[in-house]
Amino acid sequence: MQGLIDTHTHLFLEEFDEDRELVLSRAKEAGVDGMFMPNIDDTSINALLSLCNTHENCFPLIGFHPTSVDGHWKERLAVVERWLRSAQPFYGIGEAGLDFYWDDTYKKEQIEVLEKQIEWALEFDLPLILHCRKAYPELISVLSAYKRTTLYGIFHSFTGGDGDSIFLPELLDFSSFMLGINGVVTFKKSVLPELLQNNIPLGRVVLETDSPYLSPVPYRGKRNESAYVAKVAEKLSEIYGETPEKIVQTTLQNALTIFRKAKMYF
């Protein structure tokens, strides 16, 4: 299944320290031609670039994850911004967003950090990769102010779970954003298959793993990796009633619509 793109993977994390090269080799064997790697925060940049600058099919993004926002966020975000403004190439802004699932102590600060990263995305004409957990009303409120701008990107890891499906029409209304679909679509109790079949055009979907998290069936409960994005494509083939080749071709073009700076490599 050649031509797969994993639009969201964290292969630079310590979970892969023991066998990273094997993981990359398995991805290649599975037909994964490109892996886009959103940063976590100021502490993960060196690991991210160590991987991406030595492997031609790995593309780094730069950003600050909402769960990393703490009492020192201004200094930490400044480190990320210095990298963004350096000579190092980046292919997107992220992982950005809002997350009030565990704690909303820094709710106001998370919103401020998100708005700063939106400004970066617009300034550098880069896609914005958005994480959202228990925060869709706030996220939509922030993004609404930018509806008439050139902002574009991906709503990462859309699952429709926890009642999030009620926000789907509003997300789809941001026409320059794709929805990132990962292994959750293969879960037995997932509402995603029905949502995709009835409400989400294939032209609005990109594939992702979010590895090492959210492994698809039959690997659920184990560490996820980019090779498993093929399982997501297979499930979408079943859901949309399209050939695997059609799924791969369409999601590849969707991904390159977002990651425009990387088009020359495909």
Image (spheres, grey):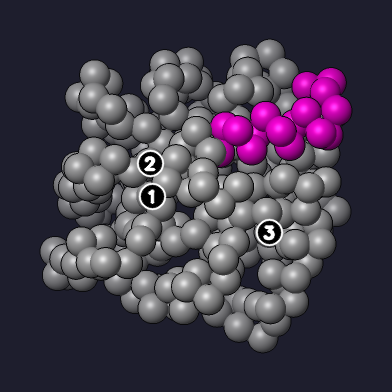
Q: Do the residues bearing badges 2 and 1 touch, measured as CB atoms within 8 Å?
A: yes
Q: Is residue 125 magenta?
A: no
Q: Disc 2 versus disc 1: distance between alpha carbons?
A: 5 Å
Instruction: Name the residue carrying label 2.
Output: 127
Q: Is residue 15 above or below residue 192?
A: below
Which segment is the magenta one? 239-255
Residue placed at 59% from the left, 56% from the top?
Answer: 35
- Picture disc at residue 20: none
For this view, does 64 lie left or right of residue 191?
left
Q: Do the residues bearing badges 2 and 3 touch, measured as CB atoms within 8 Å?
A: no
Observer-side mark, 2 or 3, equals 2
Q: Disc 2 versus disc 3: distance between alpha carbons?
A: 21 Å
Instruction: Name the residue carrying label 3.
Output: 226
Residue placed at 75% from the left, 31% from the top?
Answer: 247
Percent coordinates x, y for residue 194 in the rendering = 72, 21
Q: Main secondary structure of the magenta part?
A: helix
For this view, does 227 lie left or right of residue 46?
right
Residue placed at 60% from the left, 47% from the top?
Answer: 266
Q: Is residue 206 above or below residue 174?
A: below
Residue situated in front as seen by the camera: 159 or 180: 180
Crowdedness near tag 2: few (<14), some (14–19) or many (≥20) residues, C-alpha within 10 Å: many
Residue situated in front as seen by the camera: 97 or 3: 3
- Picture disc at residue 92: 1
Looking at the image, is mark 1 or mark 3 earlier in the sequence? 1
> Splitting the image into 4 quarters, where does residue 161 fall?
top right
Task: Look at label 2 and name its amino acid.
Answer: Pro
